[in-house]
């Protein structure tokens, strides 16, 4: 018999409203959660995945957690202390169907979509996306809590999560307006 049987486990899904690469989901959340859940004897991470937009960009991600019976409230309390983006929720299942839902998260997100096809060739040759990321971190003074990215056929998206979308946008607006690689970029609130 395995560590769990069906009667001793409550199936839950942590739906994270963040556009994280799979490796970032694992690094930021899955590994840390697994360690904390084991230490606190609340349950265990049993998998995770990402949902993608039709264009291939990441929409959000999930982490599946088998919670020990009687530990759901402890799991919720633990998750409330972890910084997640607004719109994140814990879904608790009963008989294979969603039964309860707990809202989590207070961070906001900013998506910066760099134009990958319409700028002059010398801009792509002479500018560096790593420099863009480095400068944004510097301009935000305190680095955002999370960062991820996505590269598509026509644009590259940079995702930053912190306390306030408006504050992030204000702090980086001059840089985005003056650095050639950021010309014609789109900026949107993603959480």
Image (cartoon, rainbow, N blue to C red):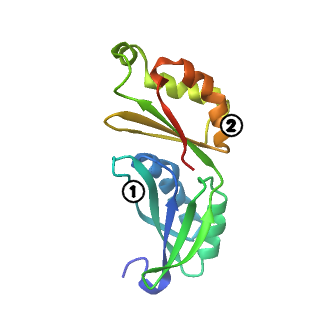
Between 70 and 112, the residue placed more toward the observer is 112
Crowd rating for badge 2 (residues with CA inside 10 Å; few <14, some 14–19, many 20+): few
Q: Quadrant of residue 118?
A: top left
Q: Residue at x 40, y 16 (%)?
A: 123
Q: Earlier in the sequence, mark 1 or mark 2?
A: 1
Crowd rating for badge 1 (residues with CA inside 10 Å; few <14, some 14–19, many 20+): some
Between 17 and 122, the residue placed more toward the observer is 122
At mark 2, the secondary structure is helix
> Left or right: 123 with respect to 109?
left
Residue 72, given in percent of the width and then of the height, sits at 59, 75
How many numbered marks, from 0 up?
Answer: 2
Q: Is residue 57 above or below residue 49?
A: above
The residue under label 2 is 167
Residue 68, given in percent of the width and then of the height, sits at 53, 77
Q: Residue at x 52, y 75 (%)?
A: 92
Between 28 and 54, the residue placed more toward the observer is 54
Q: Residue at x 36, y 82 (%)?
A: 1
Distance of mark 1 from mark 2, alpha carbons? 28 Å
Q: Quadrant of residue 177?
A: top right
Residue at the limit of the structure toward the left, as seen here: 153
Residue 70, given in percent of the width and then of the height, sits at 59, 81
Checking the image for residue 51, the label placed there is 1
Residue 167, given in percent of the width and then of the height, sits at 68, 37
Q: Residue at x 66, y 29 (%)?
A: 171
> Left or right: 10 with respect to 21?
right
């Amino acid at each position: 018999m395995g560590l769990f049987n069906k009667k001793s486990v409550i199936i839950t899904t942590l739906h994270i409203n963040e556009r994280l690469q799979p490796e970032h989901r694992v690094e930021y959340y899955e590994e840390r959660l697994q360690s904390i859940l084991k230490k606190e004897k609340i349950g265990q991470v049993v998998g995770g995945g990402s949902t993608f937009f039709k264009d291939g960009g990441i929409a959000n991600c999930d982490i599946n957690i088998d919670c020990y019976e009687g530990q759901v409230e402890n799991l919720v309390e633990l998750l409330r202390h972890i910084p997640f983006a607004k719109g994140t929720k814990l879904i608790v299942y009963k008989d294979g169907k969603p039964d309860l839902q707990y809202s989590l998260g207070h961070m906001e997100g900013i998506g910066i979509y760099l134009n990958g096809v319409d700028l002059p060739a010398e801009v792509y040759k002479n500018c560096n996306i790593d420099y863009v990321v480095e400068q944004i971190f510097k301009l935000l003074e305190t680095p955002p809590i999370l960062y991820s990215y996505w590269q598509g056929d026509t644009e590259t998206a940079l995702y930053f999560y912190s306390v306030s979308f408006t504050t992030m946008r204000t702090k980086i607006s001059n840089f985005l307006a003056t650095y050639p690689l950021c010309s014609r970029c789109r900026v949107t609130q993603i959480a």
